[in-house]
Image (tube, rainbow, N blue to C red):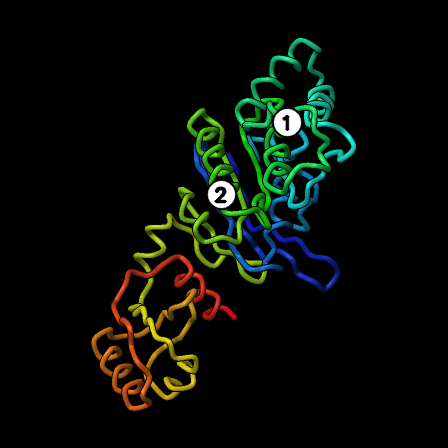
């Protein structure tokens, strides 16, 4: 479905994508994860034919040039790019016309897609008057007018509330079950967990690629979850043997080589400082733990 072979994209001396190789099979929900500036959007723009690689080769739906298969690609960019002064239905009809559909086909397809995305009750509302979550649903709906085989989405839920994010992903799952391959970039680890495979990108390179379960299983360290009202935990544990200390909400994830030895060390240090421990337990690593470690290794 998608093959990237040592793809490079440079802008003068700036190397945005550095020898990226990927192979995405039909039927996957493939996630591309990484911090801002990692190169995710550049990869997506090459995948959709907006940018040409500086070197390397790619194939999308068996074509060496994505332009040749654009009628089989759906694309949702990072920023809402539809017409704010048109209604929901008018935006959908414009997209149908651009793909050469006749009036009857546009009307039938538009009603089905707006029903699927729960936007039919808002078909006469101006796009500018939609909430952030509804705008993303409209972008999703617009990209489905031509029944794409491959749907590419660039951080589609950034800035969207959690409820709308969950609903958006339910739609992606339904599309996938109906046969659409999904390639999506996301900054959210809970969304990465929903993908069949995930590639972690950092400084223009792919540093790991596997299923979420495979990435967690390959994590080489132990993780302790610490709950404490103390505010200076990092300072108190600065001289410990812990490999890393990361805040996770109102708790801390403590990375260690030996969980039992680390737990004893943490208890001793915090008790000596008079800092209460609400809980301290070993937990399975999360994808966020994995990616923090990968970023540290390649930084």
Relative to the observer, which residue lies in front, 199 or 98? 98
Q: Are marks 2 and 1 in contact (CB under 8 Å)?
A: no
Q: How many marks?
A: 2
Relative to the observer, which residue lies in front, 40 or 158? 158
Among numbered discs 2 and 1, the one appearing first in the sequence: 1
Residue pointed to by mark 2 = 163
Cα–Cα span, label 2 and label 1: 18 Å
How would you rate the neighbour count of disc 1 (Cα within 10 Å): few for under 14, some for 14-19, many for 20 or more? some
- At which x and y percent is residue 157? 56, 45
- Secondary structure beneath dot 1 equals helix
Q: Which mark is residue 207?
A: none
- Please, which residue is most extreme toward the bottom here? 272
40 above or below 265?
Answer: above
Residue pointed to by mark 1 = 122
- At which x and y percent is residue 185? 54, 47
How would you rate the neighbour count of disc 2 (Cα within 10 Å): few for under 14, some for 14-19, many for 20 or more? few
The quarter of the picture where residue 248 lies is bottom left
Q: Is residue 86 left or right of residue 224?
A: right
Q: Is residue 283 left or right of residue 111?
A: left
- Secondary structure beneath dot 2 equals helix
- At which x and y percent is residue 90? 73, 23
- At which x and y percent is residue 55? 65, 50
89 above or below 289?
Answer: above
Residue in the image at 49% along x and 68% along y? 298
Residue in the image at 55% along x and 44% along y? 4
Q: Is residue 228 left or right of residue 172?
A: left
Residue in the image at 57% along x and 35% along y? 60
- Please, which residue is most extreme toward the left here? 260
- Please, which residue is most extreme toward the right here? 85
């Amino acid at each position: 479905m998608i093959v990237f072979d040592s793809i490079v994209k440079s802008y003068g001396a700036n190397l945005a994508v550095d020898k990226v190789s990927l192979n995405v099979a039909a039927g996957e929900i493939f996630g591309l994860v990484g911090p801002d500036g990692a190169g995710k959007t550049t990869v997506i723009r090459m995948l959709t034919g907006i940018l040409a690689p500086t070197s390397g080769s790619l194939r999308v739906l068996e074509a060496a040039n994505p332009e040749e298969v654009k009628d089989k690609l759906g694309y949702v960019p990072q920023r809402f790019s539809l017409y704010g002064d048109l209604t929901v239905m008018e935006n959908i009809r414009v997209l149908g016309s651009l793909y050469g559909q006749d009036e009857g086909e546009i009307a039938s397809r538009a009603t089905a897609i707006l029903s699927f995305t729960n936007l039919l009750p808002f078909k006469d509302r101006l796009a500018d008057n939609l909430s952030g979550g509804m705008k993303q649903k409209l972008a999703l709906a617009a990209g489905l007018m031509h029944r794409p085989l491959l749907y590419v989405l660039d951080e589609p839920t950034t800035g969207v509330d959690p409820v709308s994010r969950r609903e958006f992903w339910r739609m992606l799952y339904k599309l996938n079950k109906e046969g659409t391959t999904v390639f999506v970039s996301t900054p959210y680890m809970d969304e990465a967990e929903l993908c069949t495979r995930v590639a972690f990108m950092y400084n223009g390179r792919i540093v790991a690629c596997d299923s979420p379960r495979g990435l967690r299983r390959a994590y080489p360290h132990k993780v302790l979850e610490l709950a404490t009202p103390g505010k200076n935990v990092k300072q108190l544990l600065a001289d410990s043997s812990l490999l890393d200390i990361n805040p996770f909400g109102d708790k801390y994830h403590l990375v260690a080589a030996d969980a039992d030895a680390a737990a004893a060390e943490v208890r001793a240090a915090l008790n000596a400082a008079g800092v209460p421990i609400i809980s301290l337990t070993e937990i399975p690593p999360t994808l966020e733990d994995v990616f923090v470690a990968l970023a540290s290794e390649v930084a």
